[in-house]
Image (tube, rainbow, N blue to C red):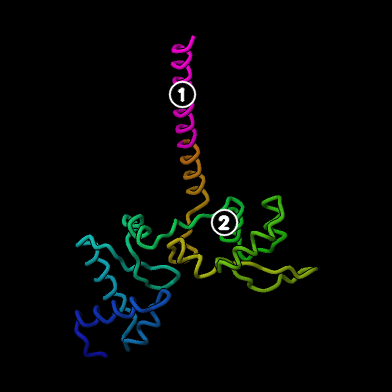
Amino acid sequence: MGSLDTNELQSVIESLLLVAESPLRIERLAELLELERSEVRQAIEALQESYRQREAGIEIAFVGNGYQFRTIEQNAEWVRRLAGSRPFRFSRPALETLAIIAYRQPVTRPEIEYLRGVDSGGVLKTLLEKHLVRILGKKDVPGKPLIYGTTRQFLELFGLADLAALPTLKEIADIDKELREAEMATSGNEKSTVEDGGSQAGEANP
């Protein structure tokens, strides 16, 4: 394997990433290629830059502590047309629960419900079935409640390299503020249009 030249190495890496069912860790790639991790990482970075330079429709993304081929975000709508699927959507309760687990993990159900103020058993069951959260064990307190944490699939779904890549709470607050302001602006425009239309209708029918 050590005899691979640069182009051959990049070609092999592309093939491995293409057939892998989940992100490949740098350690696994180095093991398969019988090379140092630094050599593999350098080859991947060269490939990533190559795709960016020619504005390719695919990229090598670092998600879930591993590398994976992905289509670029700008082409998401076209990919959905082919797949015939809709964007992954969360209910408000599911998103709240997932956010609490992501930022507070390891966390128990009573702790989640204390923060949300409502029963979260059904939501937790759904997140477990979707493999976005997992049971880490039991907390050493009376009742020994189960402890929950996020999964590798969670990182992959949100395109995160690891938990350190989660946006800060301030960033989330800023995003939420922008979304609320946008919703209010849209709502205001719609209300204005309806009122204008109503006035015109009244003039036409005295």
| Quadrant position of residue 196 | top left
Please say whether residue 62 is visible from this viewpoint: yes
Residue 69 coordinates in the image, percent (x, y): 34, 70
Which residue extends farthest front? 205
Q: Is residue 59 left or right of residue 27?
A: left
Residue 61 coordinates in the image, percent (x, y): 35, 67
The number of discs equals 2
Overall secondary structure of the magenta section: helix
Please give the name of the residue rendered at 59% of the width and 56% of the height, measured from the top-left corner. 94
> What amino acid is found at the position of numbered circle 1 in the picture?
Ser
Query: Which residue has dot 2 on it?
Result: 99
Instruction: Assign the N terminus to one quadrant of the image.
Output: bottom left
Please give the name of the residue rendered at 36% of the width and 82% of the height, measured from the top-left corner. 29
Which residue extends farthest top? 206
Q: Is residue 38 left or right of residue 170?
A: left
For the residue pair 186 and 142, the one nearer the viewer reads as 186
Please give the name of the residue rendered at 45% of the width and 69% of the height, measured from the top-left corner. 64
| Span shown in magenta | 182-206
Asked whether residue 73 is drawn in magenta, I would say no
Name which of mark 2 and mark 1 comes first in the sequence. 2
Residue 5 coordinates in the image, percent (x, y): 19, 84
For the residue pair 86 and 175, the one nearer the viewer reads as 86
> What amino acid is found at the position of numbered circle 2 in the picture?
Ala
Q: Note whether 176 is above or below 184 in the view shown.
A: below
Q: Note whether 202 is above or below 56 in the view shown.
A: above
Q: Nearer the viewer, mark 2 or mark 1?
A: 1
Please give the name of the residue rendered at 49% of the width and 33% of the height, measured from the top-left corner. 184
Q: Is residue 128 left or right of residue 118?
A: left
| Quadrant position of residue 144 | bottom right
Between the residue at mark 2 and the residue at mark 1, the CA separation in whole angstroms equals 36 Å
For the residue pair 12 and 167, the one nearer the viewer reads as 12
Query: Which residue has dot 1 on it?
Result: 192
